[in-house]
């Protein structure tokens, strides 16, 4: 992998951790520790957004999911399959398309969702590996900035 790609990935991870510490959540689902967060895509730099094909817009959100195996010491990242939808308060469903990003031992999944200012989105996800499948639901209020 090129050095510039590694720098972009590092910047993305640092940005997501720094700007969203209060927005990150973790839920234990069986043998999985699922870390999840949703932020406005404008928090990303143009370079990072371009690297991952993410649209930077005040009406575009980014969902970041990572799954760790809580049965193994050091809790390594797990490859999983994630499917799901985002639903606004009017009941309009939006299918989420996750992409997998692997950087060294880190694995995370990114999806985008459109929203309007001051809109609450409910996320309903299915996270599965070859041994188990779990449902994860959460909501996030987005603001156009």
Image (tube, rainbow, N blue to C red):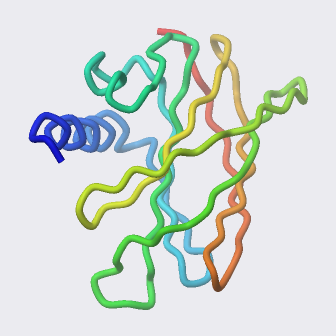
- In the image, 63 versus 98, the foreground residue is 98
Return the x and y of residue 120 as percentages of the image width and height.
70, 28
Which residue is found at the position 35% from the left and 22% from the top?
50
In the rendered view, does 93 fall on the left or right side of 64? right
Return the x and y of residue 18 as percentages of the image width and height.
26, 38
Which residue is found at the position 66% from the left and 19% from the top?
115
Residue 85: image quadrant is top right
Q: Height in image: 49 above or below 109?
A: above
In the rendered view, does 12 fall on the left or right side of 143? left
Q: Height in image: 120 above or below 80?
A: above
Return the x and y of residue 69 as percentages of the image width and height.
44, 80
Q: Across the whole image, how many numbered discs are drawn on residues? A: 0
Which residue is found at the position 35% from the left and 80% from the top?
75
Q: Height in image: 73 above or below 109?
A: below
List the single residue furthest toward the left.
3
Return the x and y of residue 1 as percentages of the image width and height.
18, 48
List the single residue furthest toward the right.
91
- In the image, 112 versus 130, the foreground residue is 130
In the rendered view, does 24 fall on the left or right side of 17? right
Which residue is found at the position 14% from the left and 41% from the top?
2
In the rendered view, does 18 fall on the left or right side of 111? left
């Amino acid at each position: 992998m090129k050095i510039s790609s590694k720098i972009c990935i590092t910047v993305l991870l640092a940005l997501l951790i720094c700007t969203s510490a209060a927005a990150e959540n973790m839920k234990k689902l069986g043998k999985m520790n699922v870390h999840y967060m949703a932020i406005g895509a404008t928090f990303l730099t143009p370079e990072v957004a371009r690297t991952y094909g993410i649209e930077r817009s005040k009406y575009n959100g980014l969902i970041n999911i990572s799954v760790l195996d809580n049965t193994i010491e050091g809790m390594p990242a797990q490859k999983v399959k994630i499917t799901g939808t985002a639903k606004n308060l009017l009941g309009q469903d939006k299918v989420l398309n996750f992409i997998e990003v692997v950087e060294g031992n880190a694995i995370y999944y990114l999806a985008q969702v459109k929203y309007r200012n001051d809109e609450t989105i409910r996320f309903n996800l299915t996270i599965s590996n070859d041994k188990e499948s779990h449902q994860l639901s959460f909501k996030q209020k987005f603001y156009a900035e």
